[in-house]
Amino acid sequence: MQREPTLRERGALLAGRGAGEAVRRLGRGGGTALPGLIAGALAPGLVEALGAQLGQGSVTVTGTNGKTTTTRLLAEAVRRSGLEPVTNHSGSNLERGLVSAYVDEAGPDGVVPDPARSLGVLEVDEAALASLLPRLRPRVAVFLNLFRDQLDRYGEVDSVAEGWRDALLRLSGEVGDSGDGDTTLVLNADDPTIATLGEVARGPAQGPGQRPTMTFGIEDRSVALPGVEHAADARFCLCGEAFEYEAVYMGHVGVWRCDSCGRRRAEPDVAARDVELMADSVSLQLDLRAEGPGRTLQIDLPFAGLYSVYNALGAAAAAHALGLPAEAIADALEQAGPAFGRQERFTVDGRHVRLLLAKNPTSMNEVARAIAGATLGSDGPSVLLAILNDGIADGRDVSWIYDADLEQLVDRTGSVVASGTRADDMALRLVLAGVEPAVVEPDIAAALEQALAITAEGGWLEVMPTYTAMLEVRELLATRTGAAPFWRTAEPAAPDAPEPSS
């Protein structure tokens, strides 16, 4: 039920907005977290209070990889459907980031403009979801995947999954008495940890705990890998026995089954068929099986890599669960463009630069595949700038790079520059993979200049950074090219560079 904000809440929102404007004026960032931190401290419960203003409810998007891109694609589908998305497009996904998104959206009176048409599209950190989901009570909750990431912060993947199960049980009313069973779960059928969330959170056989689900996955084994990767993080079923795989698409994600208890990957409601991976794009048939047999759409994604297919499927399934028109879904997937740092492209002094975030073993594997598949064209191999940081947001322990299969870059890239606070570690990993860096330069700004100097005019520089490195190098590239800061990149923009050679 929609309600007017209280005087205290209005004051908190105004204070948060003032803090955000001050941060931006001082050049200290985008004000994507501090406004929410201040407003939330002054008026606890703002997440619930502001969420109650959204006449169309909200959607949460969580998972280890792909949250920001999937959220962007879904927000664009919402916009093209005639609704107004309220979204944290900067990727600030803790409670303070969600409140900051509301702070930016609300007017001086604390009210979201056109609340009847407003729908929250909220990226939520995987560790924060357990506490936020029962408070947000979204119409749709999207779970993309669960991979090992920042073990010093998140712990093992089993701990994160257990928190998600507990949150879903509280949401369904099995724990406590506040469940309403209205949230649709959108689950990746190919990730066994995600797929079994529907089973764990199903609730009583009768009554409000029976929760609807919608699943998505890939139905094209021609793009499968030879076998399970080093980065596989879900080897065992809930019954304790090991999974068997008929096909592996990345890490532990694929066509799985447990021969002990009979659990297995179900045919997805929203599927990708006839997948064709190209240098900087993907062609696929989007099968909306949930809408009825024979409902397919031809989609040309402006992104590289199989992981981009999963992002698109997650957004399409969520949009479908919301009842958005199929045409709006297709248009959004094809035209929304990349989120900041996620296959973003720049042109610097006649050189084409592509920025590909790699923050854990699985994402680095997929980025390396995208680079390897785009660097053998007639213009010669691309230059690679690999940047490894160990900031808090990256994870202090960088040993995960040894579970990434960088060997696939051998003879698939030109000169290589290693950089970041752990440049020596990055260089050593590359050497052990058979890829000899030409330059090892810890300072990111200096490394970028050297990498650009090595890149031929008209050629491509591929930048593979971890998270904090991505923010730094993107700011450098934005300054050089006049691109908008990352906190202002909500609107889709056409790329300004040609595609890499395939």
Image (cartoon, grey):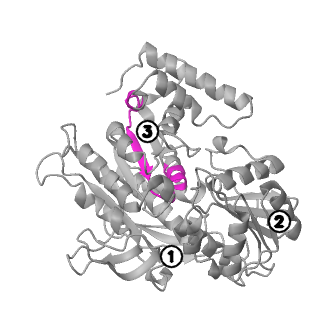
The Cα atoms of the two marked residues, 1 and 3, are separated by 31 Å
Q: Residue at x 53, y 41 (%)?
A: 88
Going from N to C along the chain, the mark reached first, 3 or 2, is: 3
Mark 2, residue position: 451
Q: CA distance from mark 1 to mark 2?
A: 33 Å
Q: Is residue 195 above or below residue 97?
A: below
Q: Measuring from the top left, give residue 313's x and y in whole percent.
A: 45, 62
Q: Specify whether residue 51 is painted magenta.
A: yes
Number of other residues with Cα within 10 Å of mark 2, as a class: few under 14, some 14 to 19, many 20 or more: many
Is 106 located above or below residue 144 in the figure?
Answer: above
Bounds of the magenta segment: 48-74
Q: Callout 3: 10 Å neighbours few (<14), some, many (20+)?
A: many
**Residue ID at (70%, 74%):** 428
Q: Nearer the viewer, mark 3 or mark 2?
A: 2
Q: Earlier in the sequence, mark 1 or mark 3?
A: 3
- Relative to residue 32, is residue 173 drawn left or right? left
Front residue of 300 and 337: 337
Residue at the spot 49% in from the left edge and 77% down from the top edge? 230
Q: Amino acid at mark 1?
A: Val
The residue singled out by tag 1 in the image is 275
Q: Quadrant of the C terminus?
A: bottom right
The x, y position of residue 399, in whole percent, is 57, 67
User: Local crowd at mark 1 within 10 Å, few (<14), some, or many (≥20)?
Assistant: many
Callout 1 secondary element:
strand
Q: Percent x, y for residue 397?
A: 57, 61
- Residue underneath mark 3: 119
Q: CA distance from mark 3 to mark 2?
A: 43 Å
Say whether residue 112 is visible: no
Amino acid identity at mark 3:
Leu
